[in-house]
Amino acid sequence: MMKFDVVEVFKYPTLDKEWVRKLVMITAPLAVVYLISSLIRFSSNILDVLSEFSDTADDFTYLLIYMGLIGVALLFSLASLPLMLYISGYTLEATRSVMAGNRDTLPEHVEIGHKMLDGLKLWLARLPYYIGLTLAWVIALAIFFFGAVVSFTDGGSIPIGVVMMIFAGLLVLAMIAVSFVLTFFVMPTTTYQYLKYNSVTAAWDLKKVYRISKLNWKNFGLSELITYVASIITGIVSFVLTFCLIGWIAQAAGFVWLGLVRARLLGQAFAEAEE
């Protein structure tokens, strides 16, 4: 199992001599995204309150306003997609840097288009796994609810419905286990495959993904576990700071910090990976 200093890992985003400039350049746009998202949610909540206390509420007017807010939210989500791709590509570049032995310097904000394309390729590399898992969850939940309907509908066959619900429950437990394996072992391996071969399809080689995951499960799993713990910490901090009206800044800073901490951990794990 790989050895590392937890404090050094958490400090990685700030070890660069120009870390303030580099982090602000990526955190500021994301903070604006979170701010606008918060304003949209706040507007929706205000609208709900007004609709409850207004005696002259026009349902059609409120519907139009709601549809407008949803439209704005969708357009804004599409507009922020390039930024999310860039952040994904930027953390990938940081992972490459750590793999090469550079553990105290953050990537520069250059070749923006290349980093966005890099992020998009990583998303595509992971897409089949997410699609498969989502379909499995949909099937499991559909079987469960169908069994419940059969059990509690007049004239329905209760034994069959109960059996279907038990089967679906076991299937859901299996999906939880699969989700755990996917998150802690398969996803790091797909990232490793993509970085090593610079190929989306390399991440779809199930035999190789299984073999590499099996050989490196301790390092990959430990990296994701520490990242998960760090995400809980950032979530708590962001929630507390929400009451100080700066939660949107904390969310952005926490998201970027968490991505770079993960890059630091996975970079070292990938450098020590066995095949």
Image (tube, rainbow, N blue to C red):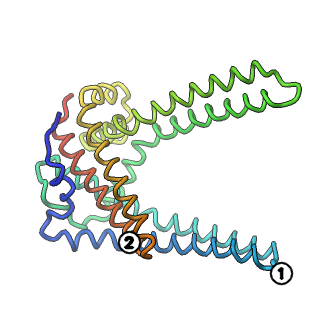
Mark 1 residue type: Thr
Residue at x 84%, y 25% (from the top left corner): 156
Q: Which residue occupies the foreground of this view, 148 or 262?
A: 148
How far, Cα to Cα, is label 2 from label 1? Answer: 38 Å
Q: Secondary structure at mark 1?
A: loop
Q: Which residue occupies the foreground of this view, 243 or 249?
A: 243
Residue 124: x and y in percent read: 42, 46
Residue 56 circle label: 1
Image quadrant in which the N terminus is located:
top left
Residue 256: x and y in percent read: 32, 61
Position of 225 relative to 73 (above/below):
above
Residue 249 circle label: 2
Image quadrant in which you'd find residue 147: top right
Image quadrant in which you'd find residue 193: top left
Residue at x 39%, y 32% (from the top left corner): 181
Left or right? Give the position of 251 relative to 53: left
Residue 78: x and y in percent read: 52, 64
